[in-house]
Image (cartoon, rainbow, N blue to C red):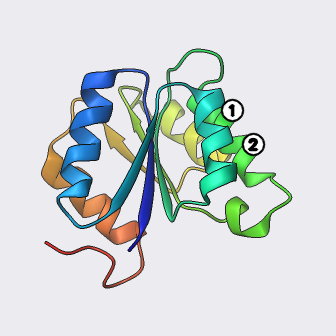
Amino acid sequence: MSHVLVVDDDPVIADLVAFRLGRLGLQVSVEFDGEAGLAAARQLHPDLIVLDWMMPRMNGLQVCQALRSDADPQLARTPVLLLTAKAQEPDLERGFAAGATDFVTKPFSTRELVSRVTAALPPGSVVE
């Protein structure tokens, strides 16, 4: 079973994402700020991280950069899906430069989220 870590400071969004991904047969863990999310990623070694950009203590770009420079090569290669309201071209460039694998723009449809998560995980990981 694939494991997804959801990191978002909005509990409503975090719960919605966790619920929807859990219905796909994925194991889901949730954290509510960047520092806690980075610590959880290092402990849990998820297969995918769904990461909000604007959060307290450590923003999503900082978390993404820390993941990409981590000494653990498996963690450094973990796909990161930024879930953000920042969707202008310069924002996308900054996100990809920080190491994001893909983006989902808020407000988002759960169908798009599922599609992007499915694409980022190994084939057969998602049961729809």
Q: Is residue 90 left or right of residue 110?
A: right
How far separated are the C-alphas under marks 2 and 1?
A: 6 Å
> Please, is residue 110 above or below residue 116 in the view?
above
- Front one among 15 and 103: 15
Residue 111: x and y in percent read: 14, 54
> Please, is residue 50 above or below residue 108 in the view?
below
Looking at the figure, which quarter contains the C terminus?
bottom left
Q: Is residue 4 left or right of residue 119?
A: right
In the image, what residue occupies the spot 86% across and 58% down? 71
Q: Amino acid at mark 2?
A: Ala
The picture quadrant where one finds residue 106 is top left
> Please, is residue 35 above or below residue 125 in the view?
above
Q: Amino acid at mark 1?
A: Gln
**Numbered label attached to residue 62:** 1
**Numbered label attached to residue 66:** 2
In the image, what residue occupies the spot 78% across and 68% down? 73
Residue 44: x and y in percent read: 60, 56
Secondary-structure class at tag 1: helix
Residue 72: x and y in percent read: 80, 63
Q: Is residue 112 left or right of residue 1?
A: left
Q: Is residue 93 left or right of residue 19?
A: right
